[in-house]
Amino acid sequence: MDRKRRDFLSATAAAVTLSSGLPAALASTEPASPQAAPQNAATPSAAAAPGVPGYAAPTEIKSIDIINLRELEPAAQKVIPPGGFGYISSAAGDEWTKCENEAAFKRVTIAPQYLSGYGSADRSITLLGAKLAMPIALSPMAAHAMAHATAEVGSAKGTGEAGALYIAGSLSTNTLEEIAQAHPAPKWFQIYLPADRGVAREILLRAKASGYLAIVLTIDTVVPSNRETDRRNHFRWMQSPGNYPGVSGGYSQSPTKRDLDWDDVEFIQKTTGLPVLLKGVMTPQLAAAAVEHGCAGVQVSNHGGRQLDDVPASFTALPRIAEAVKGRAVIVIDGGVRRGQDVFKALALGADVVAIGRPALYGLALGGWMGVQGVFQHLDGELEMTMRLAGARAISQISPHFLSL
């Protein structure tokens, strides 16, 4: 196998590894058993994550005191092993896009409408027919076992306890069935489409059978990116080609499809009959095409700055995409969300739901499922405060009227 192909297959595998022997454990094709810990158990501060011997992931499950989401990162750095923390926190190239994701929110300000007479702020929404307590979701991310021993089972439980939408990633440590058990509330399933249609069909039908209500196809990872922090840390993707621990079951030998096109979107639609969303949409042209091809929604995302550096912030791209979609499909946005004000601004510019990534993994590292629940509750609390002060009674009322544009 030539180097270029080997690097691609490594980059599209299911979890990350240190060069010291982590890969074999993560490459297991047997479904992992979720390890639940008592709510306030006196557990050691670090232990092997499920199925990953030798990787000292945190294990504590506890409520955490959150002042703001940015302060979770340095706290999490103290408990996540260096290789894993570097993978979670870093991005591609100069990491300009990662930084721009946060900075873009600060260039748009809120125009509060005082004397509204409202005494409450309803944050509940209905999304693709599902009722949610807040317009906030967990974006799909790989291998949560890097952050905590309970992995995706922990993040799913915490998200569900908060009443938020969980988007399960196909590059997960726990199986999609285990994740579904931990999160009986509304959930979607994200897929990196295998090249083998038989493999892809089986994964998609398992997701449907497990109760996932929509399929999210990631479209921006057809080649690996230059994540230089991982190279400095000698932190590599596992070397088992095309292996998907989170969707394992004897059919994990197909590499990810490199030449995605609209036929693949149609294949997912026909196979599942579920709503299909495209993750990685950054232009109004692609958003309009997605609607024309029957997609139920788009996720405005630059992969947290982890794929192509020097692209705009997701928030910067949002208004033109919303204009192109014209309310015909759901719009999800992720990237740089750290405040309830960020959620408010994104909703005002056309998003239907706002997804978070790194802060949830930091919460998971610091408190297990209770830490994840705390992250969502904190962000929801800031959104409620912003709505009350700005003068919006319900999510449906939030519009550009509340922004100084």
Image (cartoon, rainbow, N blue to C red):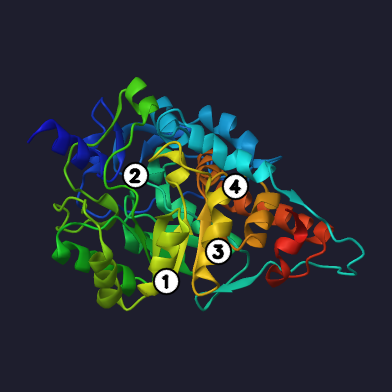
Q: Nearer the viewer, residue 189 or 345?
A: 345
Alpha carbon of mark 2 to alpha carbon of mark 4: how far? Answer: 29 Å
Task: Name the amino acid, label 3.
Answer: Ala
Alpha carbon of mark 2 to alpha carbon of mark 1: how far? Answer: 40 Å
Give the residue at the far left of this rendering: 1
Camera-near label (4 vs 3) is 3
What number is the disc on residue 322? 3
For mark 1, what is the residue?
A: 291
Q: Secondary structure at mark 3?
A: helix
Other-residue count near label 4 (Cα within 10 Å), few / some / many at <14 / 14–19 / ≥20:
many
Q: Secondary structure at mark 2?
A: loop
Task: Name the amino acid, label 2.
Answer: Pro
Alpha carbon of mark 4 to alpha carbon of mark 1: how far? Answer: 25 Å
For mark 2, what is the residue?
A: 50
- Report how many numbered discs are placed on residues in the image: 4
Instruction: State which tag comes first along the sequence, 3 or 1.
Output: 1
State which quadrant residue 252 falls in: bottom left
Instruction: State which tag comes first along the sequence, 4 or 1.
Output: 1
- Residue 352 locus on image (x, y percent): 58, 66
Residue plotted at (30% across, 54% down): 246
Other-residue count near label 1 (Cα within 10 Å), few / some / many at <14 / 14–19 / ≥20:
many
For mark 4, what is the residue?
A: 337
Task: Name the amino acid, label 1.
Answer: Val
Other-residue count near label 3 (Cα within 10 Å), few / some / many at <14 / 14–19 / ≥20:
many
